[in-house]
Image: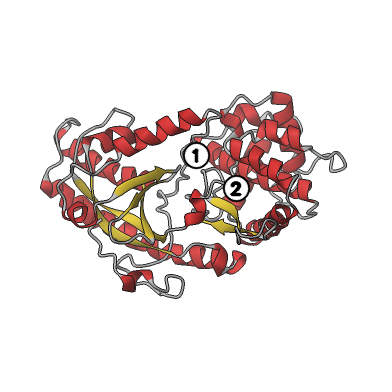
Amino acid sequence: MNEKISHDNRENFPEDKYDNEGNSPEDTILKDNKEVAPEITRLDPEANALSKYREHVKKVFSLDKVEHEAVDKYHPQVLDKGGEHVVYTVEGHRDVVVKVATGPLKDTLDKIFYKKYQKTHHKERAVSRQDFQETIFDEKDIMKKDIASGVKRYERMREWFGKEHVLPQRRVIAEVPLTKEIIDELYENKSPGFIDKVKAIITVQKYTKEVNDPEHLAIVSGYAEQGGVPEKMYSKATQHLIFGKTPEQKIDQKELLKVQSTLDLKKLFSALEKNEEIKKALKEFVIKAIAYSQETGEILDIAGHDNIIFYKKDHDKKEGAWTHLLIDAIYPGSPDIIDKSKEVLSAISSGQTIGVNEKIILLNSFNYIRTINGLAEQLGVEERIQIAPEGMKEEHIDFLKIIK
């Protein structure tokens, strides 16, 4: 976090063209030829459970007691943690937040610890400075390439949804301080070692007050396969909303919410019944999302909390217009996930057994498509995201069992 955050860096984010040192718009590190499963959104019907989780996050990812130049200069404070990022505020820069992606951070640590293991065959020993420098040299080149490759994805998203609907941001490579508590959390208390700092990609993003507005709404799909979803309802929703079966039989709200059963989605549907302006804003977004996915082959990350929000433009007006904002909407995996999903479905249809990565592909694409197509059906939008390979016979395939 020792990358300088200046007024020059923060102004005109969308128009800047950044160099290979990491000064480029949003991108997410992609594992080599692997899909990344975003962490399951921590949604609990009980407000106190969510509050306890946030207290845990602030304690674990706190940098208050760390001796590091960036900590001394910016005094980062944990704001929150979503599925992919730990979010910090920085002193003296109230108009931005700094985000550290935990998945890519762990990938880097994995490589550092693995190199040490190869040399010593002893996982518990701390990483030497030489190991650290050698690994960082390799990783920094990878990070530069990954950041540069993300410019097209970020700019393409802004073109499809409009600059005013996508938060200005940039990614930089910076030295991030670590604590034992942070590493233990990343490795679920099975840490193979310790290192006090590492080079990582951080996101400097414009702060939006709307995310803290108690009236704001969000699209959150969650992961149906990883909850207690009713098998018959899951099969019906999947066949209808993903494969287009029985188009004359509409899935109603209650049925959809039994499958994509998140608190945010329930709250959104409830608001739709009371406010036409919310319905108008949601319909505009859904139409764009379907066209975006059909044309680009990408999905949006709607599994995480508050990645895409809706808010009222003018709070002084009782019936004011609503709009949408994409905060962390870039899917942290392959940009061609639609095509990859078709390949996996073709393999299943031909009787092949799929692996973990293929299951993750379907987990993410299925939940996105069921949610967006389900919203389209409720809003009277005719277009749908199409994913079924030509000639596929999926009626007797137990997708819940396969993905779960």
Which of the two discs, 1 and 2, sits closer to the camera? 2
Mark 2: secondary structure: strand
Q: Nearer the viewer, residue 234 or 78?
A: 78
Q: Which residue is located at x 34 percent, y 53 percent?
A: 89
* Image location of residue 347, percent across then percent down: 62, 40
> Residue 357 got which mark?
1
Real-space CA distance between mark 1 and mark 2, rounded to the nearest whole angstrom? 32 Å
Q: Earlier in the sequence, mark 1 or mark 2?
A: 2
Looking at the rendered image, the quarter that the N terminus falls into is bottom left
Q: As displayed, is residue 95 above or below residue 271?
A: below
Report which residue position mark 2 lands on. 217
Q: Position of residue 192 (x, y in %)?
A: 24, 32
Q: Nearer the viewer, residue 65 or 17?
A: 65
Say few, some or many: other residues with alpha carbon within 10 Å of mark 2 (under 14 / 14 to 19 / 20 or more): many
Question: Disc 1 marks which amino acid?
Answer: Asn
- The residue depicted at 42 percent of the width and 74 percent of the height is 12
**Amino acid type, residue under disc 2 in the picture:** Leu
